[in-house]
Image (tube, rainbow, N blue to C red):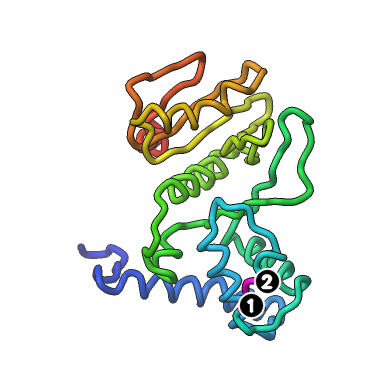
Amino acid sequence: MSGSYPYPLQEHRYQYLSNVFKTLIVRDIVRRHNVRNESALLRIADYMMDNVSNITSARNITDAINADGLKITNKTVGAYMGYLCDAFAFYKVRRYDIRGKKYLKSGEKYYLADHAFKYALLGTRNMDWGRVYENMVAIELLRRGYEVYVGVLYKKEIDFIAIKRSEKLYIQVSDDISSDKTFEREISPLLSIGDAYPKMILARTHHEATDRDGVQIVDLARWLCGEA
């Protein structure tokens, strides 16, 4: 198409995205913060990408990297994680104790700004689509202007608490809730919440129900497109 931006051919797209990440994000961090160990920075980014939607800490990453023979301190790892978030490569989401009404001091989750970077740098091995969809929802909530937290209630986890001024949403994200067992696992934490704010399950494959005890069952693709 005349005048359009030249998008790489299919076989070169991942290489293109890999170069974008390394050039626009990593090299900018190296220059801005005078990072001496670029390979460690990339290792940390790889670890964070491979663990999106999992509880992640500087200590976890330090232990993993040191176990592979690359010596690095917990303080340095924490600093590099902060640099990656400041560059908007990742977004840190804190956990919130719903019953105790307090933020938890540890156990944050990190979400990748664009999941295509993970495909480009790490490939599609061991793909966990539930985590991929959770990452997509986290980024979309942030894009829509919500404050985003991970909810904790009676040792159960609610994927997201989304807050914007007086509005609050509780959200569970799932790849497939067509089986009764999975549906009950996803809806149970939401039904344990005592307040009247809206609660929903976003899922790719639905249960027969569209609403249960005030919990909405919403098509994930339609929600991501702003249609639900």
* Residue type, mark 1 in image: Ala
The magenta span reads: 63-67
Q: Is residue 38 magenta?
A: no
Q: Which disc number belongs to residue 67? A: 1
Quarter residue 27 falls in: bottom right
Residue positioned most to the left: 1
Bin the neighbour count of mark 1 within 10 Å (Cα to Cα): few under 14, some 14-19, many 20 and up: few
Residue positioned most to the top: 213
Give the quadrant of the C terminus: top left
Which residue corresponds to the image point at 51% horizontal and 76% vertical from the top-left?
22
Q: Secondary structure at mark 2?
A: helix
Give the x, y percent position of residue 127.
Answer: 39, 57
Q: For the image shown, how many numbered marks are present on the structure?
A: 2
Q: Is residue 105 above or below residue 183?
A: below
What secondary structure characterizes most of the magenta part? helix
Q: Which disc number belongs to residue 63? A: 2
Quarter residue 160 falls in: top right
Q: Are marks 1 and 2 in contact (CB under 8 Å)?
A: yes
Which residue corresponds to the image point at 40% horizontal and 61% vertical from the top-left?
126
Could you give the CA–CA distance between mark 1 and mark 2, rounded to whole angstroms? 6 Å
Q: Is residue 178 left or right of residue 38?
A: left
In this view, the residue in front, 164 or 203, is 203
Q: Is residue 158 left or right of residue 178?
A: right
